[in-house]
Amino acid sequence: MNFINDLINFPFIFYGFMTSIILALGFGIISPFIISKEQSFLPPAISHSALLGISLSLLIGATQTEVFFLTLLISTIIAFLLSYFINNNKLPPDVFIGIFLTITMASGILINEVFLNNQANLFHFLFGNILLISKQDYLITFTVVLISSVSILSLFKYWIFISYDPQSAKNQGIPVKLFQYLFSFILTMLVIASIKMTGIILVNALALIPGLFALKLSKNIKTILIYSTSFSILTTIIGFITASTFNLTTGVTIALVQFILLVIGISSKKLIGKYL
Amino acid sequence: MNGTLLKIENLSCSFNEEKVLDNISFSLSEKISIGVIGPNGGGKSTLMNVLTGNLNKNNESKFYFKNNLVKKLDPRSDFSYLPQEKYFNTYFGLSVLEFIKMGQIGLKIKPIKIDEIIDIFDLSKLLKKDFSQLSGGQKQKVMLARVFLRNTPLIFLDEPTLGLDGKANDQLIQIISIMKNSFNFGIIIIDHHIDTLIEHCEQILCLNKNAHWHSPSEKVTSDQIQHFYHCEYEHLLVHNHQLATGTKAPHTECSTEHSHDDTTVTLDKSGLNKNKKDKLQ
């Protein structure tokens, strides 16, 4: 029981572990909605734009908490701009995502190269480093997940309506566009909060796999939510323990554990359906 | 007493600097349904879009709801709308009951009891089924049930019977009539089944950009209809389905000015084949 010893003796492992589980809960709740609203592009777009925010805040020498809020601010603006372009243009949305994603990331890297010159730091943000998570990050993540879960669960029937039948929701006078911006904001908070754990590149797995797993296994929305959340938390715990036991990168390990369980889940459902 | 629910005065609407609707006026009372007919591109769907607030009207246009001048009708309390084109994201399932209940979301007034709606629309056997698995006719019925559940005084229906066969079509039109009379709705229906509309609607509104008339449906003559479509009424009935196929279908042109027709020849509902000469005399 090496892991439990570590958890008790090393505060940074404790905070890293707790932060990951709380984030898993947050992503578990929002993940089915990301997929059913057909917005699987949003998490990567936001996470890549975060690099610009991080570089800018490091440039002005911000403290850890300031880095979070500054990055959140910049990424929110970019996510809103993206939503605006997608809402008000007749061009396919993936064009904008492709362009935004590249440009924001490029400017982030350029700022880093020209002004900061610390390539090692960049690597942490790309793939995540659980050792960087502090008590502050833990508290911020807790608040972020609390806000996002309450926003999703308290307006649950609205989210279902807008995801399933956006046109009728609009015709019934529900402010569909406002909900879209709220959704982008919630997702931005979650993505920014998770960057130290999963990194910019791996956050997609955490945001999409639990929802896909649940949607493949059930049709009922409440069951979907329960499956998605438990899958997300369980795989995070397994991934975290595996990573810390074999000294691997946590975000990478969690992503792979999720993928393996996704494949096992879907194929066993197919097998059960075939032979039972 | 039948109160006036909606009065439209001088409604105009421009689209890319071209007037799609020009100076349209009509009113709608409780327990009355207006059937909107007219060739493709004549402005039927534009009228719906303006009424529901999806398109802006010109400044001189005036809307009165229950005799009060309003800028816009409120979807949370004044009207419910069944659009012609529908799409659903069916990544998760919703039962028919859950689907109908969505009609109550955001509503400011008291909806009709759900059991009552289920009874009238005869949906009790479908309630637990997945909405996305229903047949086209069943879906249409369920969506109509959701629209009526909201109990808003005005109901706007754009092609409620699109894609349905004769029997299902009649059934749906009948339910609409029942709902109208039991709950005092004022209904505006767009449909390409001209004969059905003339039979079931109290009033007919024919739109062709700047031309329109509005009269009790008993007074609608096949002459008038021919005037709008510029072809024989019988031909239109035969090609009913064709009219629904889009702007490429024939009978879309009408450039001549014409006055409001007050001919009072009664349309013989069974004798739609009556020839033109009889009526002119």
Image (cartoon, coloured by chain):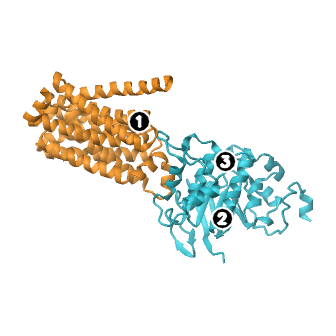
Callouts 3 and 2 close, C-beta under 8 Å = no
Residue on which the image places disc 3:
B162
Q: Nearer the viewer, residue B119 or B224?
A: B119
Residue on which the image places disc 1:
A94
- A173 above or below A263? below
Q: Secondary structure at mark 3?
A: loop
Residue on which the image places disc 2:
B180
Q: CA distance from mark 2 to mark 1?
A: 46 Å
Disc 3 packing (10 Å; few <14; some 14–19; many ≥20): some
Q: Secondary structure at mark 2?
A: helix
Q: Chain of mark 1?
A: A
Which of the 4 image quarters holds residue A6?
Answer: top left
Q: CA distance from mark 3 to mark 2?
A: 20 Å
Spot occupied by residue B134 in the image (x, y as percentages of width and height): 60, 42
- Type of amino acid under label 1: Asp
| Number of the front mark, 2 or 1 | 2
Q: Chain of mark 3?
A: B
- A92 above or below B177? above
Name the side, left or right, on which A211 lies relative to B91.
Answer: left
Q: CA distance from mark 3 to mark 1?
A: 33 Å
Which of the 4 image quarters holds residue A245?
Answer: top left
- A187 above or below A123? below
Name the side, left or right, on which A202 lies relative to B92.
Answer: left
Residue found at x 19% / y 26%: A243
- Type of amino acid under label 3: Leu
Q: Secondary structure at mark 1?
A: helix
Spot occupied by residue B232 in the image (x, y as percentages of width and height): 83, 52
| Sequence-first disc among 3 and 2 | 3
Q: Chain of mark 2?
A: B
